[in-house]
Amino acid sequence: MIKIKYKNAIVKHEGIKPTTCEVCGRQGKPRGMQYHHFKYAYGVEEVRKRPELAFHNTIFVCFPCHKIADAIRITEKNPETAKKIRELIRKKQEMIR
């Protein structure tokens, strides 16, 4: 059985036993808390051989914070796309006014 103590959660092969979101401090139930990978550093085969690698480069977050973290990761990965989105939002806001 794999058992890894990671910050404020104990992870077993049966699932995750969460306690607190590392971003906002919200305490939640297992289905509302998740690990967010801020960097994908390992391939699937490498993680299958060494499961503890799945928890590298992660933060433990609630669902609302996870959505924001995903958006930040995408923005950092594709800065040109993020710039186009910001410009489009500004144009739409000006049209509304």
Image: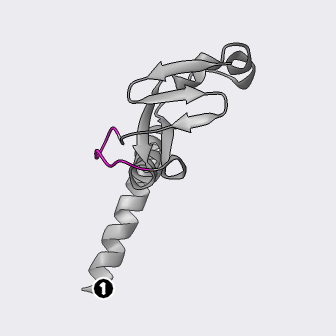
Q: Which residue is mark 1?
A: 96
Residue 22 coordinates in the image, percent (x, y): 33, 38
- Secondary structure character of the magenta stretch overall: loop
Q: Is residue 62 magenta?
A: no
Residue 9: horizontal and vertical position, in percent? Answer: 44, 31
Question: Where is the C terminus found, in terms of image quarters?
Answer: bottom left
Mark 1: which secondary structure?
helix
> Compared to 38, does 50 lie above or below?
above
Give the residue drawn at x 73%, y 20%. Answer: 48
Q: Residue at x 53, y 24 (%)?
A: 55
Q: Which residues are magenta?
A: 22-28
Name the outermost residue toward the top: 50
Label 1: few (<14), some (14–19) or many (≥20) C-alpha neighbours in 10 Å: few
Front residue of 40/21: it is 21
Question: Residue drawn 27% across and 79% down?
Answer: 94
- Amino acid tagged 1: Ile
User: Residue 10: x and y, percent?
Assistant: 49, 27
Left/right placement of residue 33 relative to residue 90 reads: right
Is the residue 53 above or below the residue 15 in the image?
A: above
**82 on left or right of 50:** left
Give how far across and how far down residue 28 sits, in percent. Answer: 41, 50
